[in-house]
Image (cartoon, grey):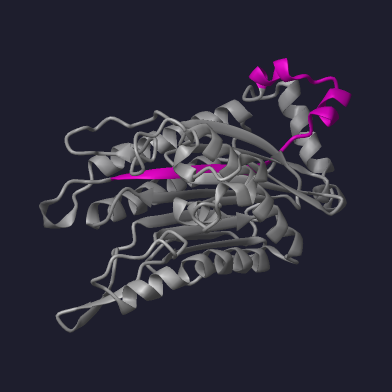
Amino acid sequence: MSKLDYTDSILDFYNFNDEVRVCKGFTIQTISNYPILEKDGVKHRDGDPVADAYGFYRCRNFFIYSVNDGCGWGVEPSYAARVASATFVLFMKNELEKNVLRTTEEIQELCRTGLALAHQTIIQLEVPEGKIGGTCTTCCGVIVPIIDNEELKKKGINSTQFEDIHQEGSKVQQEVKEYFKSITLKSKVLEKYQLIGLSVGDCKTFFIKNEQNVWTTEDLTYGSRLHAIGSNDPGGRIGIQGTNKRMDIRNAMVYHKILKWNDIIMVCSDGIHDNLEPQTRGFSPNEIQPELGDIKWFKLKKEQIEEINRNYSLKFISEVASHAVSVHQFHKMMMDAIIGVIVDRKKYMEDHPNNAVPNVFSGKLDHATLLLARPTF
């Protein structure tokens, strides 16, 4: 980890406000796509309270984030998601503010500890109305500047010497401090960053790269649903489920990615990425892959569907990114694409609250969270 710059720091958490939170090179928003219905003369939004939540700490050259999706409806999952996001972000903020030089492995271990602490905090939570704490899925992590290994090699330092990084007066510690002093404004543009992320459940993290104006997207959490048991199983979760206080880490992932200053990280709940899938958007398999013929979605294997979903959504995200001139515009275009898919289904439910929704309507109604960020600004 290189030197952290705390300039223009912003700490914030979701507070049931649907408005997009905008910082330099960074956006985050949680919304509800559920319809507004009327019962006994009183209008209410279906699915409230919102079960998605986020927390973030954004500074000049690093940030900490946590995106969480409460499992199910009601007070318990909503509390679980908000507690998890706040616990992780505040823990990591406190640790990184100690200004200790850390290796990737050390930061990864801190992230694991932060996630475990979030799980324990949910378990100990006292929810109103005598209910027990719920569960949530999560994508959380940090993006930090890193020391260029090539520069250190020029100084005769290799990775095996980093075990002495915390030893006061050691050669590696002195050389790293000298490296910090040599960083200029120009070289900061060339500085490298590292994403260190964790996921449990079906929230997703995408890496969006612009190389000579060619945009490509990678799903860093691919396969998180492959071993899910049924459509309501996110594959993993943190918190307390009934009397079970153990963390469900069946699909837990740890991932790293080296970033440049103009790369983009996209983190979202399933209310976003489900609506990027071709089946949810109303396409048949042969419209996406003509060689499949007239086969129906339910005839395909889970692995086939996952692969089709990945290829389609990655191309979709890359295409949107290529037409956006800023992170803020990218965010708006993505949210418009999601809302556009579900608007007819939502309106039908509002106009016909007692009717089943016809299959002709596309989209999936859900709580939805979208985070987009460059590593620096």
State the residue lying farthest toward the top: 160
Q: Position of residue 5 (x, y in %)?
A: 67, 51
Q: Is residue 321 left or right of residue 273?
A: right
Viewer-proximal residue, 197 or 223? 223
x and y percentages locating residue 278 in the rendered image: 56, 52
Q: Residue at x 56, y 28 (%)?
A: 106
Q: State whether residue 109 is above or below residue 14.
A: above
Position of the C terminus by quadrant = bottom right
Residue at 69 percent of width and 60 percent of height: 320
Q: Is residue 315 visible?
A: yes
Q: Residue at point 26% right, 73% down?
A: 353
Q: Looking at the picture, how far across and down is residue 323, in whole percent?
A: 75, 64
Which residues are drawn in magenta? 135-164
Number of labels in the image equals 0
Q: Quadrant of the N terminus?
A: top right
Of 187 and 371, which appears nearest the observer? 371
Instruction: Answer above or below: position of 28 versus 354.
Output: above
Question: Is residue 190 located in the magenta-colored stretch of the structure?
Answer: no
Q: Residue furthest front?
A: 294
